[in-house]
Amino acid sequence: MIKIQIAVLLTLFSGLAASAQSVQQYKTDSVFNLVKKYFNAKQPDSIYAFAGEKFREALTPDAFRYVCTSQLFPLGQIKNSSLIAFVNNKDARYKLTFDSMALQLWMNLDDKGKIGLFLFQPYKEEAGNKPKPVATTNLMRNQTDKKVDSAVRPYIQKTNTVGLSIGILRNGAITTYNYGETKWGNNQLPGANTLFEIGSITKTFTATLLAYYANEGKVKLDDPITRYLPDSVSVNPELKGITLQMLSNHSSGLPRLPDNLDNHDLDPLNPYKDYEKQHLFTYLKTCKLAGKPGEKYAYSNLGVGLLGTILEQVSGKTFEQMVEELICKPLGMNSTAQHLTLALKQRFVAVYNENGKETPAWDFGILAPCGSLRSTVTDLLIYAKANMTAANTRLSKAFELTHKVTFDKDIKLGLGWHIINIGGAEYYFHNGGTYGCSSFLVFNPEGKLAVVVLSNSGASIDAVGGEIVKSLQ
């Protein structure tokens, strides 16, 4: 993916461009036309002149010039362009046609009329709808059932989605809903005990392990990571200011992924499979940070993978063993694991990419702590309830520590958890996405509400989860 994102978190809801052009849309289109002109003239500095404060904080002129010359300008001239959508009278989405491919550009303007968001993505035609209503266990008996169905139908009726499992914990009562199929064409509804890849929700488990060992005195949150790295790695001066906490709250300055991830890979559909410790340490020996440690939020799979690697060294156990012994076994989460037994495999879905094509489930090497776990709605509701309920146990105290704010600059985080606002209330949140599954988990202890949504499609379910939460408040 070619990506320049000048925003911390961006939640986009589908919508159509207004039939009558608004003043804001006119302003955005006017800037876009100039950007297009300077793009085709290969003048990055002229484009950068339109950059707003957030844009400039995220990318220096040199960095923007490098991205343009190395990634964007090689695509050639923008032959044609068209506005696809103008969402919330702010976010414009344009289709850009080049000689050999099409991209979409998300762009918006800040309060001063400067570019705030500048995000290139592959262009995808909108998926059509299935000819018949997808099967469901939702009996539509009450208003809650109807609200959930209303949130789910726009997603599950698309031709590129297959199955969906939803769990709601509200005032101590659990309700589950299931839609679609566990495998395309098998007419078998998923259930609350069907396993899905949960992707980056795994990071909250890694954060819990960090909190557990910190409470035990085996590590300190402000320990420098160099204390736990080989001398040949720790000599890299770029790593000196990074702490364990920064790896968990995405403020380390490390990039999202190591730049040698692709170099080792034998299977592009299973990108983490063969990436092992030697690859990670080779990268860290010479890596350069994108920013000063502790200063900015920059989501990093690499950082959490490294954190888990350090905790493996501290504990003498594998990531999967730590998760099993310290979290899953005490809570009775019997269907959460990295590697599935034969019995668990019988309940694991077939997985499909965001275009609806079946794709392999992911395997993980050393970066397993960033996204390797598989789980069920039942287990994740147990996990959410344990996070919401104070108890005098070492695990509960670890959960409590993960909820304490460790970063609060434009975005608020604990350890692993993003703390977000939905409908005026604060929730602890994480989502996940592999090539073949999407996941969503939020909980609000004061409101006694938790929502889990799992899909065996790479198409994001964030909008579904958000709508369900808002409908239940």
Image (spheres, rainbow, N blue to C red):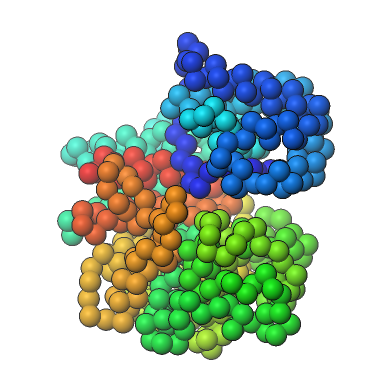
User: x and y percent of residue 458 in the render?
Assistant: 54, 47
Tell me if 382 is positioned left or right of 116 in this view: left
Q: Can you say whether 47 is above or below 209 in the image?
A: above
The quadrant the N terminus occupies is top right
User: Residue shown at 57%/30% (left/top)?
Assistant: 114
User: Residue shown at 19%/37% (left/top)?
Assistant: 143
Q: Can you say whether 438 is above or below 325 in the image?
A: above
Answer whether residue 396 is visible to the viewer in this image: yes
Tell me if 97 is positioned left or right of 51 in this view: right
* Figure quadrant of residue 424: top left
Q: Nearer the viewer, residue 205 or 86?
A: 86
The quadrant the C terminus occupies is top left
Q: Nearer the viewer, residue 379 or 27?
A: 27
User: Residue shown at 34%/65% (left/top)?
Assistant: 403
Q: Nearer the viewer, residue 205 or 249?
A: 249
User: x and y percent of residue 20 in the render?
Assistant: 47, 11
User: Residue shown at 62%/74% (left/top)?
Assistant: 240
User: x and y percent of residue 349 in the render?
Assistant: 49, 56
